[in-house]
Image (cartoon, rainbow, N blue to C red):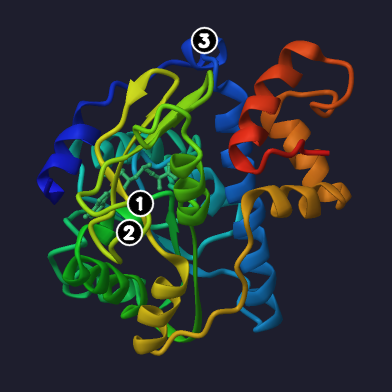
Amino acid sequence: MSSSDVASHYNSVKQSGIAERKGSRIYHLRNINNWMKSCLINDGLKLLRDDCVYEPKILDLCCGKGGDLRKWNNAKAASVVMTDIAEVSIDQAKGRYEEMKGRNGNPPFPAQFITLDSCNNDLLPHIDPSFLPIDLVSCQFAFHYSFVDESSARQMLRNAVSSLREGGLFIGTLPDADRIVWAARSASDNDNKWENRVCSVHYNASSSLDNPPLFGAKFDFSLDEQVNCPEFLAYFPLLVQLAEEEGMELLWEKRFPLSAHQYLKNTHERNLLYKMSGLKVLPQEKNTAVKEEFEHVSQWMDGDEIS
Ligand code: SAM
């Protein structure tokens, strides 16, 4: 398993249209993930505003197809660096950016697109100096890939923080290693494989589940029957320690279910979920089709309903 396998996987993922996405069994799960990213980014922006930064310079590390470009527009970004290992994804991100140009042909913000394996290269020399220093680095659903081995994790982390200004922020989301280990341990068939109707997780590292390695703890993950490339557990306290060694300080850590509960207490975030998901009611309210999917999602997240 190497970075080039990850690149090949993401380069071969086909882009689905809106109709196809709406018909997908994980339509709402995608919406929740997207909503959580928006809430997290808003949390980061609030902190930056407290620091009098109103038009932040952004680095979207492992940006994929550019799904967060509109969020950077809403964030009133001064500039955005988008980087990913997968060339096809970067091309799609460029396409999305082009579509954001107004009638006058002007883009909403200057952007730089960089195809780079951030586990094995220094990113900083590739960034146009006018895009530096970065105020906010965002790495969404991707950092765990670097936990394939120690040098990759350290390199990815250096790339996340070396372009940050003093007091800049690094935010991100990643699979919950504790939750995955718990699920694999509770697997009934003793094959370290846990599944529900939406996703499956198979712990596949050579060392036993009783003592997962700090790096290289491989698991196979499939969502809505699409098998992903192998992923790796990122043990959060270890990530915090590595980040501290790079001069970072942990401000907050939140698990998805708890965050969802907290965000839904705020009118703004609640309305945002309605807007992003198209839902008029929350899952536990009377929409049973949606409720079922949310139950699978929340069962995966914490065995708990989002309410
Ligand atoms: N951040 C995007 C989002 O939230 O939609 C994409 C998330 S996708 C699950 C994970 C991304 O990480 C993929 O686009 C993949 O190409 C990227 N990635 C994985 N390993 C990488 C590496 N070594 N360097 C750069 N990008 C990498």
Asked if one can make out residue 61 in the rendered structure from this viewpoint, the answer is no
Asked if one can make out residue 24 in the rendered structure from this viewpoint, the answer is yes
Task: Give whichever of discs 1 and 3 has the lower sequence position.
Answer: 3
Quadrant holding the C terminus? top right
Residue type highlighted by circle 1: Leu
Q: Horizontal and vertical percent for residue 75?
A: 60, 58
Residue under the point 75% across and 41% down: 272
User: For mark 2, what is the residue?
Assistant: 212
Compute the Cα span from label 1 to label 2.
Answer: 5 Å
Q: Which mark is residue 209?
A: 1
Q: Nearer the viewer, residue 42 or 104?
A: 42
Could you say whether the residue bearing mark 1 is in a helix, strand or loop?
A: loop
Decide: few, some or many residues near mark 2? Use Cα within 10 Å; few <14, some 14-19, many ≥20. some
Q: Horizontal and vertical percent for residue 121?
A: 13, 67
Residue type highlighted by circle 2: Pro
User: For mark 3, what is the residue?
Assistant: 19
| Foreground label between 1 and 3 | 1
